[in-house]
Amino acid sequence: MVQYVQETYLYDPNVLLKLDFHRSPAKFQPFISAANPGESWLKVRPLKDTDYDRGFLQLLSQLTEVGNVSRTQFLTRFSQMKASGDYFVTVIEDTRKGEIIGAASLIVERKFIHNCSVRGRLEDVVVNDTYRGKQLGKLIVVTVSLLAEELGCYKMSLDCKDKLIKFYETLGYVLIPGNSNSMTIRYDEDPAALKRNATSIIGASSGDACQTVSLEFAS
Ligand code: 16G
C-alpha cells in the first residue's frame, strides 16, 4: 500500500513562480530565477512542516547557534508562523538528497505609518558552503526581496556583518547615509537568566559588528 505523507507549506508556493527576476539589479550569469534555479535538482520553495527531516535546522546552525530544537518545538513554531501570515521562510532544496541547502526569511512587519503600510525584514540568510558557484546566495536573497515587493512592502532591510555589505549592495541594498546603524541589546549573555515562555522568540550567541542595509522599492 502506498502511503502519502501530507505536507504543509508555510505560504503559497505559487507566488514564487510569478516573481520577475529581471526587476532585480542582481547580475545572474547565467540567468536563473526561483522558477528556474539553474539545475533540475534545485527547488526554491516555502519552508514545509516536514523540513525538520531535511536538515533545515542543521543548515541554520551554519549561521548561528540553533540549540536542541525538538520536532515538537519546530512544528509549534511553524504553526505559529503560518497562523500569523507574516513569515515567509524560503528554502532551496537539493531534491536529489532531499536536503535543504539554502534559506532566507522575509518577515513582514505591519505598521501604522505610511498609511498602515508594511515593511520587510530579511533574516537568517544561509547557504550550504559546499554549493559554491551556483549563485544560490544571490538566488535566495533576490527571491525574498522580490517577494517583499510583491507583497506590498515599502522597503526591506537587513543586518549583516561588514564583510557582507558588498554582496548585498550588488543586490540593490544600500547603506543610507546617516541612517545605517544597527543597534542591539542582548538578553542572552547569561543563558541561565534568559527568560523563556511560550511566546518567546529569543536567539543566542555573541555579536559581530553589524550594519543596516536597506532596499527601497520604486513606487
Ligand atoms: C545575521 C542575520 C540575521 C540573523 C543573525 C544571527 C541576515 C541578513 N542577517 O545578522 O538574520 O538572525 O545573523 O546572529 O541573514 P545572532 O545569533 O547573533 O543573532
Image (spheres, rainbow, N blue to C red):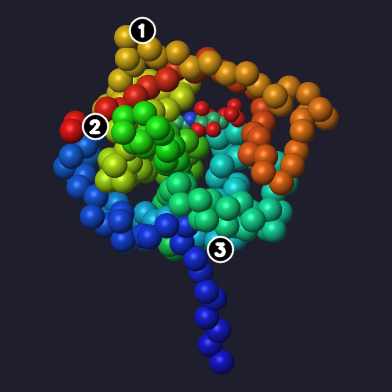
In the image, farthest residue toward the top: 178
Relative placement, left or right, of 26 versus 53 is left
Relative placement, left or right, of 123 versus 70 is left
Q: Which residue is mark 3?
A: 50
Q: Up-down: is 164 above or below 94?
A: above
Query: Tag 1 or tag 2, which sits nearer the N-term?
Result: 1
In the image, farthest residue toward the right: 192
Query: Tag 3 or tag 2, which sits nearer the N-term?
Result: 3
- Residue shown at the point (73%, 22%) measured from the top left: 189
- Residue shown at the point (36%, 60%) measured from the top left: 13
> In front: mark 2 or mark 3?
2
Q: Is residue 94 visible?
A: no
Determine whether label 2 and label 1 are within 8 Å by CB.
no
Q: Amino acid at mark 1?
A: Gly
Q: Which residue is mark 2?
A: 217
Q: Amino acid at mark 2?
A: Phe
Q: Which residue is mark 1?
A: 178
The dot on residue 161 is none
Q: Amino acid at mark 3?
A: Thr
Relative placement, left or right, of 69 versus 125 is right
Quarter holding residue 149: top left
* Separation (CA) of disc 1 from disc 3: 43 Å
Q: Nearer the viewer, residue 41 or 161?
A: 161
User: In which quadrant of the rendered image does the C terminus lie?
Assistant: top left
- Residue shown at the point (45%, 13%) measured from the top left: 181
